[in-house]
Image: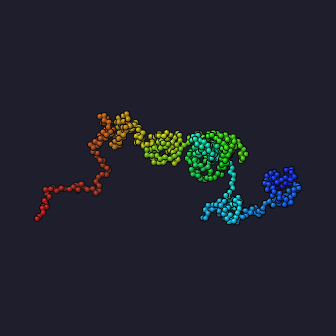
Amino acid sequence: MEEIREVLRLWLGLAVGLPAPGLRTIAAHAGVDRKTVRRYVEAAQAAGLTRDAGAAAITEELIGAVVAGVRPVRPNGHGQAWEALVPFTDQITAWVKGGTKDQPEPLTVTKIQILLTRRGCVVPYRTLVRFATECCGYRRTTTTVRIVDGDPGMECQIDFGYLGMLDDEATGKRRKVFALVFTAVYSRHTYVWLSHTQTLSAILDGCAAAWEFFGGVFTVLIPDNMKPIVTQPDKVNPVLTRGWLDYTAHAGFVTDTARVRAPQDKPRVERTIHYVQNNFWAGENFPDLETAQSAAVRWCEQTAGLRMHGTTAAAPAVVFASDERPQLLPIPAAYDVPVFKQVKVHRDFHASVGRALYSLPETWIGSTLDVRLDSQTVKFYHRGSLVKQHPRQPAGGQSTDPHDYPADKAAYALRNISKLVATCEHYGLHIGIYAARIVDNPRPWTRVRAVYVLIGLVGTYGPGPVDAACATALDFDVIAVPKISSMLQQAMEKTTPIMPSTAGSGPSRFARDPAEYATTTTPLALVPHRDTTIQE
């Protein structure tokens, strides 16, 4: 109505100061098409308006008559094309939804337009789209609510966005560049971290740089379901990766992941990614990633941080400095990025981690344990409980705890000669001296097996006989364990052990005299001779 009023005022010469301006002049001043001006003027003339009439002639009744003249009759508020689609409402709804035996998949609007044309219903494409959306459930939009921002310093949303290609000095090739964007929910203050990859290491490096930029850590971090952070998405209880959980425990924040394919769960950073792509990256030509990162920090501080935000009507950097920064958690210490893996403990009491060997107790042989490996330590876990920790060894190295071996194998495995001699001294004085004489060699390790044989003789014959045999051998200066074994065997053969009687060893109830079982042998001379000669 205002448009019609302005066109008629110009046509009467009440606005431009010309007695009879042309249609082109009226269209230029009213901002409408020349054909539209002609339709309005012709409808007004049909309603009785003349060129010499004054401003009082432009009444509400005249404007209503012009509106009725230039617009077709729409009894239901829609045009003829819309009314032509009403009889096909059920059919269009079935085409849009699909899921039937004859039509398992939904049809596109273009295909629906073709099918309607075959049935004699020819309508514009845009009218069909509006009709299908409003009446047939096509692209049915739902209402949404604006969620209140959290407390200052509470939430920060993060997400990756693709920017473009950039030369990589390390490889000499052009590589993709991704922006890890951090957006404070309350103030909308933004930090951008550039990377060639989207790995966990890149995310952790970006987090460390972001905490330095913001001056602290937010209480809650809201990422999407990126694989370095989430291994199993879920609306309520998503499963996070071990590396990310370890870092959250180090930094002290809580992770609240967005739902799968639900950008409305992190709208602040979603909108900021487009802003970074269009305002920071577009049209720039950076020589390398380091230069681009420095430019990104300046852009966050001076451009994005000091702009007047359309929603908050304030500069994000100013609001962040006054309200959010005092509420942030302290910046954590430098984080040593670990590696998590699973290893099996082998029969030699060791597990291989990072091409080095680490010992574990005998109870874990054959088990598969979780390992956390960083630059300083190697930790072994079983169902979340720490079972062993070793200092990190270089490739080819070995870290062995003597207590992980059984008591009878530790000295042998570790080539502990003094421990073996001390064990022999515990069994007897002469046994200890004999063992010391055995290993009295420039290469004592080559004689260790003989000491183990001597200890085995103690287990077979007892400490006393072995100590006596060692004393006799020392008197004759004979240092040979086989000789000790021979002496003990000969002593056993000369001595007939008397078996001790057991309690209640008297005759049993049904015992009989052994004489009853004695037999008498008949002399050969008393046996009668039997003639075996064949009688003819």
Q: Position of residue 390 (x, y in %)?
A: 49, 41
- Say if residue 39 shows up in the picture: yes
Q: Quadrant of the N terminus?
A: bottom right
Relative to 52, 399 lies left or right: left
Q: How many numbered marks does the figure carry?
A: 0
The scheme the figure's colours follow is: rainbow
Q: In which image quadrant can residue 325 be found?
A: top right
* Residue furthest out toward the left: 536
Camera-side residue of 463 and 391: 391
Q: Quadrant of the C terminus?
A: bottom left
- Say if residue 427 shows up in the picture: no
- Residue 131 in the image: above or below residue 200: below
Q: Position of residue 24 (x, y in %)?
A: 81, 52
Q: In which image quadrant can residue 51 be found?
A: bottom right
Camera-side residue of 116 and 274: 116
Q: Position of residue 186 (x, y in %)?
A: 68, 46
Q: Position of residue 470 (x, y in %)?
A: 32, 37
Camera-side residue of 512 and 240: 240
Relative to 403, 336 lies left or right: right
- Residue 284 in the image: above or below residue 36: above
Relative to 173, 34 lies left or right: right
Camera-side residue of 77 and 393: 77
